[in-house]
């Protein structure tokens, strides 16, 4: 039996082949998908589940429609293309500072699991600990996304990278 990550990697490979790309290396993986760099300075992300794919694709489409490439100091990857059948998103590679990974974002509504005051307080406490003195800047960035109707939930180091983090 093939596992979800192997299946996603196969879909990423198929996407690359169909589009004349070569996969260079795996950039990362997480609970929502697997990401590879390509020979064309793009990244392809194969998502494990349709709902995560649709949320991420729709965020990238909104950002493209609004011509957003930067929020505050953070670069936002630009959508190159998406394949609904393969659940693969191709995006440009960005350098720090950047924000990425929108599979847990919601358009025009808060994430349903962040709907009770105690849950929100716990979530914010965790984020404050993760980002320490940078948390105020991350919150400002999140407010600007929210003004675009994009409600981020999966903000964490790795998804939000400052220039100093790349040293």
Image (cartoon, helix red, strand yellow):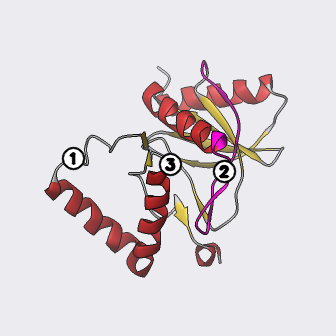
Which quarter of the picture shows residue 20?
top right
Real-space Cα separation, disc 1 to disc 3, in angstroms: 20 Å
Between 3 and 116, the residue placed more toward the observer is 116
Question: What percent of the width, then of the height, locates residue 28?
Answer: 58, 50
Mark 2 secondary-structure assignment: loop
Between 37 and 120, the residue placed more toward the observer is 120
Q: How crowded is mark 2: few (under 14 residues within 10 Å), some or many (20 or more)?
A: many
Real-space Cα separation, disc 2 to disc 3, in angstroms: 16 Å
Question: What percent of the width, then of the height, locates residue 147?
Answer: 46, 53
Image-based side of 125 in relation to 151, left or right: left
Question: What percent of the width, then of the height, locates residue 75?
Answer: 65, 60
Of the two numbered discs 2 and 1 on the same chain, state the one appearing first in sequence.
2
Residue annotated with mark 1? 115
- Residues drawn in magenta: 64-85
The residue positioned 69% from the left and 46% from the top of the image is 78
Question: What percent of the width, then of the height, locates residue 74?
Answer: 60, 64
Residue annotated with mark 2? 77
Circles 2 and 1, Cβ within 8 Å, touching? The answer is no
Mark 2 or 3: the one toward you? 3
Q: Is residue 59 magenta?
A: no
Residue annotated with mark 3? 148
Mark 1 secondary-structure assignment: loop
The residue positioned 23% from the left and 57% from the top of the image is 120
Q: In the image, is residue 155 above or below residue 78?
A: below
Of the two numbered discs 2 and 3 on the same chain, state the one appearing first in sequence.
2
* Extreme-bottom residue of the structure: 133
Image-based side of 89 in relation to 151, left or right: right
């Amino acid at each position: 039996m093939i596992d979800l990550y192997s299946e996603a990697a196969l879909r990423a490979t198929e996407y690359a082949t169909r589009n004349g790309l070569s996969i260079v290396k795996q950039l990362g993986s997480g609970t929502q998908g697997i990401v590879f760099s390509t020979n064309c300075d793009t990244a392809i992300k194969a998502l494990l589940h349709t709902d995560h794919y649709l949320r991420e694709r729709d965020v990238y489409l909104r950002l493209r429609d609004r011509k957003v490439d930067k929020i505050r100091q953070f670069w936002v990857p630009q959508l190159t293309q998406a394949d609904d059948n393969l659940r693969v998103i191709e995006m440009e590679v960005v350098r720090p500072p950047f924000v990425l990974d929108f599979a847990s974002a919601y358009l025009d509504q808060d994430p349903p699991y962040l709907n009770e005051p105690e849950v929100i307080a716990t979530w914010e406490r965790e984020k404050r600990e993760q980002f320490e003195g940078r948390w105020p800047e991350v919150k400002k960035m999140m407010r600007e996304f929210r003004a675009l109707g994009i409600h981020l939930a999966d903000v964490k180091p790795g998804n939000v990278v400052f220039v100093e983090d790349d040293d």
